[in-house]
Image (cartoon, rainbow, N blue to C red):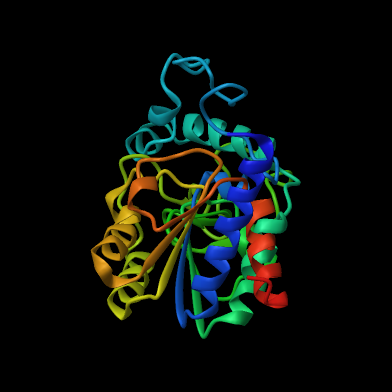
């Protein structure tokens, strides 16, 4: 395909997405790591990832280091890697894709964003209806007394693991570690959204490897709505989606919103 044809195909997919959203009342947006990529957020694995090697410096995988069982056995070790990830992400700001979703909410009756990311960027952008399925790295809570607090970043933390100011218990981030269950409150909200149905599900920057994430796409494929995917590459759910917008969220989402606002579709 020539470059001009490729650009035309992208423009056409954006126009199709804008038409679908223009007639939608309820929209469910599901975002993954690709949503934050344009904010400079690093991945764990892959070229340029924080942990390209199979094992960390402690001789275990990053998944084991960031697991619930490891936190129970050795919270200092788990915190070591949580702190490394937070430091690598520190200073990241919402990108045009995050802000585009906030603008998109003004064009539909109900838009809910469900994110797998723990970086808090959707919240920082001003997203109103937000479900942080895996938690938020900026919220800490004490595993002994439950007292919680929000921190802008970890630069003010002076020990690992940090301790509760009230009872001196160990604190942890309010995020889902590997081998832990999803938070019940977030899961219940998500299930209510699915039960209420949707006209369009917008999948952004996620491969939807978890079945609960793929569920709305499968529902749309069975005739319960329309599915749109925004991702530079094809994923396991591409074939289930009605529209594929190839490209990063920071480019595609604002382009769709612009089409909605100008009526140029």
Outermost residue on the bottom side: it is 109
Measured from the top left, where is residue 195 in percent x and y?
28, 76
Residue found at x 40% / y 37%: 71
- Res 213 seen here: yes
- Quarter of the image for residue 179 reads top left
Quadrant holding the N terminus: top right
Outermost residue on the left side: it is 222
Residue found at x 71% / y 68%: 258
Measured from the top left, where is residue 55 in percent x and y?
45, 16
Comparing 261 with 170, the one in front is 261
Residue found at x 63% / y 81%: 106
- Res 126 seen here: no
- Is 218 situated above or below 192? above
Quadrant holding the C terminus: bottom right
Count the marks.
0
- Quarter of the image for residue 64 reads top left
Q: In this view, does 222 lie to the left or right of 80?
A: left
Measured from the top left, where is residue 7 in percent x and y?
66, 45
Q: Is residue 5 left or right of residue 216?
A: right
Q: In this view, does 212 lie to the left or right of 13?
A: left
Residue found at x 32% / y 53%: 214
Comparing 116 with 11, the one in front is 11
């Amino acid at each position: 395909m020539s470059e001009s044809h490729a650009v035309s195909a992208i423009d056409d997919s954006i126009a199709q997405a804008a038409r679908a959203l223009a007639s939608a009342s309820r929209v469910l947006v599901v975002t993954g790591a690709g949503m934050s990529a344009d904010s400079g957020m690093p991945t764990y694995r892959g070229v340029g990832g924080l942990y390209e090697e199979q094992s960390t410096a402690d001789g275990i995988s990053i998944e084991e280091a960031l697991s619930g069982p490891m936190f129970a056995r050795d919270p200092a070790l788990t915190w070591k890697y949580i702190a490394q990830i937070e430091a690598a992400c520190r200073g990241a700001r919402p990108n045009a894709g995050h802000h585009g979703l906030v603008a998109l909410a003004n064009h539909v009756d109900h838009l809910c964003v469900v994110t797998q990311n723990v970086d808090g960027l959707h919240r920082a952008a001003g997203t109103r209806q937000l479900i942080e399925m895996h938690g938020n790295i900026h919220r800490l809570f004490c595993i002994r007394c439950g007292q919680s607090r929000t921190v802008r970043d970890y630069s003010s933390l002076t020990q690992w693991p940090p301790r509760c100011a009230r009872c001196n218990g160990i604190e942890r981030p309010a995020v889902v570690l590997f081998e832990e269950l999803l938070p019940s409150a977030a899961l219940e909200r998500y299930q209510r959204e699915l039960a209420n149905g949707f006209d369009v599900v917008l999948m952004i920057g996620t491969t939807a490897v978890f079945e609960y994430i793929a569920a709305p796409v499968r529902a749309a494929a069975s005739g319960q709505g329309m599915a749109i995917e925004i991702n530079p590459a094809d994923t396991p759910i591409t074939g289930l989606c009605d529209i594929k917008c190839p490209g990063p969220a920071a480019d595609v989402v604002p382009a769709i919103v612009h089409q909605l606002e100008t009526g140029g579709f």
